[in-house]
Amino acid sequence: MNILVSGGAGFIGSHACFELLDAGHDIIVFDNYYNSSPEALANVEELTGKSFKIYECDMLDRASIEKIFEENTIDAVIHFAGYKAVGESVAKPLMYYNNNITGTVILLETMAKYNVKKIVFSSSATVYGVPETVPINESFPLGVTNPYGRTKLMIEDILRDVCVSDKDWSVVILRYFNPVGAHASSKLRENPKGIPNNLMPRLIQAAKGEVEYLTVFGDDYPTRDGTGVRDYIHVVDLAKGHVKAIDYIADNKGAIEINLGTGNGCSVLELIKTFEKVNGVTVPHKIVERRPGDVAECYADPSLAKELLGWSAVLGLEEMCRDSWRAVMYEA
């Protein structure tokens, strides 16, 4: 299939581009490089030995999006593009609503115009809000606590409405848990611009001595060691899930929501200890008060992904920690 990948230069997007090409698909990519770099796509081409069209454009630019569809035969879209920092979304909600919601509507309108009605959407476990129990399955109540999460849930609703209005649409909504790790080559990795929002890049900064310590928010949660428990998933496993989702929408109509996680909860302290053990480094850290809105435990029930997509995570926490560190040291 010819797959258009929006936001394909990002952390998850670039890994998905690699896996799509590796599986025999052809890709077209667009990205505005707001929080990514053209270097990631150059590395995808180098690693796969395959070239592909790359457009530098913003999804709010309707004319540029239409040009992509005019110049290419597109069978399906994987939609990664969007702002993704929770804190920034709280500070700049209108920017998030305009970019993530309006940009997605423009993309969907253009898809409909060119009769491209297959899409895999990059959603998030944040749409579950504060879950009452774990593990979390797709039937859980939905609720969000910040504008970033609200944009994800709104886009999910838009996609479901589109499928109700037109039975020819095929939509897979993938709800990610906590992606970490890097490609085995170390040439694809998480490389955020500015202050990192996710735990692993902050942990690595502490291990490298770039910051004095890693801040651990709370050690009084009702968990096995008092720190928050999350479902960390290797980005390579996550990327492979998108290839499986593309296979699924080739043969299925309507909208379906699917969790992508390991099903295993890991605490912050367990992550730190594993990282230290496999990499032979020390991660200085300091316990501070909880952050408002953080939940004690959040991990997936990934059984639907196995049932419908034939997908399950295979890489464990040690590989996640080892690959994350090796990629950073490779860059150094």
Image (cartoon, grey):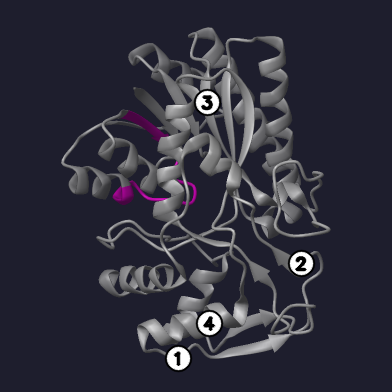
Which amino acid is tagged 3? Answer: Ile
Give the quadrant of residue 154: top right
Percent position of residue 181, x then y: 42, 63
Q: Which residue is mark 4?
A: 272
Considering only vertical position in the picture, is 28 above or below 31?
above
Q: Which mark is residue 264?
A: none
Q: CA distance from mark 3 to mark 2?
A: 31 Å
Marks 2 and 4 sit apart, C-alpha to C-alpha, by 19 Å
Q: Label 4's element?
A: helix
- SS at badge 2: loop
Residue annotated with mark 2? 294
Give the residue pinned by disc 1. Answer: 282
Q: What percent of the width, then of the height, locates residue 227?
A: 70, 79
Cα gap from disc 3 to disc 4, whole angstroms: 37 Å
Name the amino acid, label 2.
Asp
Stretch in magenta: 27-40
Sequence-first disc among 2 and 4: 4
Q: Which mark is residue 119?
A: 3
At mark 1, the secondary structure is loop
